[in-house]
Amino acid sequence: MNASGFKPALPGISSSKRLGFFSFSGGNQPFDLKPRGVCLIKAAMEETRTLKLDVNGKVEDKLPNGHAGKSTVACALSHMLYQRGNLSYILDGDNIRHGLNRDLSFKAEDRAENIRRVGEVAKLFADAGFICIACLISPYRRDRAECRAMLPSEDFVEVFMDVPLQVCENRDSKGLYKLARAGKIKGFTGIDDPYEPPLDAEIVLQCNTGDCSTPCDMAEKVISYLEVKGYLQA
């Protein structure tokens, strides 16, 4: 039995004693142990590519244009945690909207409900001793604050991917910004709908034009924070 009272799902893999791990994405531009915890990753880009492994089992740390998307960083982080023997699970916003939240639109009230539901699911993972990494569009401070309030004090870790709008639009692999600029998509975060930047994020990952860390470097920064704070203790 591990420290949380749950038998590890895989040989050699243990849940964290202090952290259930949860991450949000911050949307289309910048503006988601202690018994449980949440890590909120708010990313500016809509990169949903799954990282590949090289012949040695290491993450291939290369992306088009050299930029790191939110889901790419989450995958790198999950892989690093696995290598360290920590159970983790990624809740990806796109996948969630195909299943659990397929009944929700992108209106403000439905976005709030989308975040609330994912927060509740992440809390369940945290209660089970998992490090839950969620990548979603989370544009409003109120919604993020409500997710933080779901957990005990200091069990919520917010990671803000601070990426300029120009970089987001240059990295627009899905063509969504172009459609929004043409008025074909309404309520698009960063174009005609606001993004409220976090005021108290525990971690900030910056990516500027011509100066952007690799996905693995960003994930390492998160790992370092968790180590210092004692979240990854066996």
Image: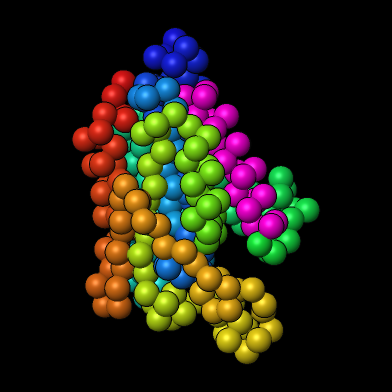
Q: Position of residue 39 (x, y in %)?
A: 42, 43
Question: Image height check: is 6 above or below 146?
Answer: above
Question: Image height check: is 226 above or below 14?
Answer: below
- Which residue shows up at 59% across the image and 54% down it? 93
Identify the image quadrant of the N terminus: top left
Q: Nearer the viewer, residue 75 or 161?
A: 161
Image position of 48 (left or right of 69): right
Residue 231 shows in this picture? yes
Q: Is residue 124 magenta?
A: yes
Question: Image height check: is 21 above or below 206?
Answer: above
- Which residue shows up at 49% across the image and 67% down it? 195
Q: Position of residue 185 (x, y in %)?
A: 67, 79
Question: Image height check: is 128 above or below 134?
Answer: above
Q: Quadrant of residue 14?
A: top left
The residue segment tinted magenta is: 109-130
Hey, which residue is sitting farthest right in the picture? 103
Q: Position of residue 221 (x, y in %)?
A: 26, 49
- Which residue shows up at 42% across the image and 62% down it? 197
Q: Position of residue 177 (x, y in %)?
A: 55, 80
Residue 133 shows in this picture? no
